[in-house]
Image: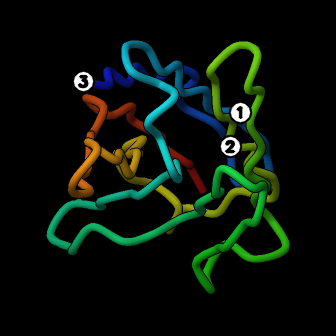
């Protein structure tokens, strides 16, 4: 089992920055990829950014050039640096990990952290 705990959310003005952290615990060696999704009120959950065990990254179109995902394997922590924030970035941000059980893959999710960007 893998447990994920997010932190770093809050209220920020448009144009500002925030850094989210996601600390993983448990069977972290079984994580094949980890990343962030977000969900705004009334909208579907969408991919923000992901990073593989090999370090490859991918981003949602709406955040490319503004957000950067990184991971510290020694600390079992993944970060999301968010710059040039916009009101439309307001959402609950969820950390998620793709975990290999030995025979199949499954997703593990954190509880989410609120990010609010004021105009």
Residue at (38%, 24%) from the top-left corner? 4
Between the C-alphas of marks 2 and 3, the distance is 23 Å
Q: Which of marks 1 and 3 is nearer the N terminus?
A: 3
Q: Mark 1 points at which residue?
A: 19
Residue 96 x %, y %: 38, 45
Q: Find numbered disc 2 in the image and state the secondary structure of the residue it sits on.
A: strand
The residues bearing labels 2 and 1 have C-alpha atoms spaced at a distance of 6 Å
Q: Which of 104 and 33 is in front in this view?
A: 104
Q: Nearer the viewer, mark 2 or mark 3?
A: 3
- Residue that label 2 marks: 80
Residue 95 picture quarter = top left
- Give me the C-alpha separation between circle 1 and circle 3: 26 Å
Badge 3: residue crowd in 10 Å (few <14, some 14–19, many ≥20): few
Q: Tell me whether circle 2 and circle 1 mark residues in contact (CB < 8 Å).
A: yes
On screen, residue 41 versus residue 97, left or right, reads left
Residue 74 higher or lower than 73, as above or below: above
Q: Position of residue 78 (x, y in %)?
A: 65, 34
């Amino acid at each position: 089992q893998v447990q994920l705990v997010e932190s770093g959310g809050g209220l920020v003005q448009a144009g500002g920055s925030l850094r989210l952290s996601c600390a993983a615990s448990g069977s972290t060696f079984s994580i094949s990829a980890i990343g962030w999704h977000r969900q705004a009120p009334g909208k579907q959950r969408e991919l923000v950014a992901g990073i593989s065990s090999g370090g490859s990254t991918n981003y949602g179109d709406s955040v490319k050039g503004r957000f950067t995902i990184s991971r510290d394997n020694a600390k079992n922590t993944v970060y999301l640096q968010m710059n040039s924030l916009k009101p439309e970035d307001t959402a609950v941000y969820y950390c998620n990990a793709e975990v290999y059980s030995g025979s199949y893959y499954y997703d593990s999710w954190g509880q989410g952290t609120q990010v609010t960007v004021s105009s």
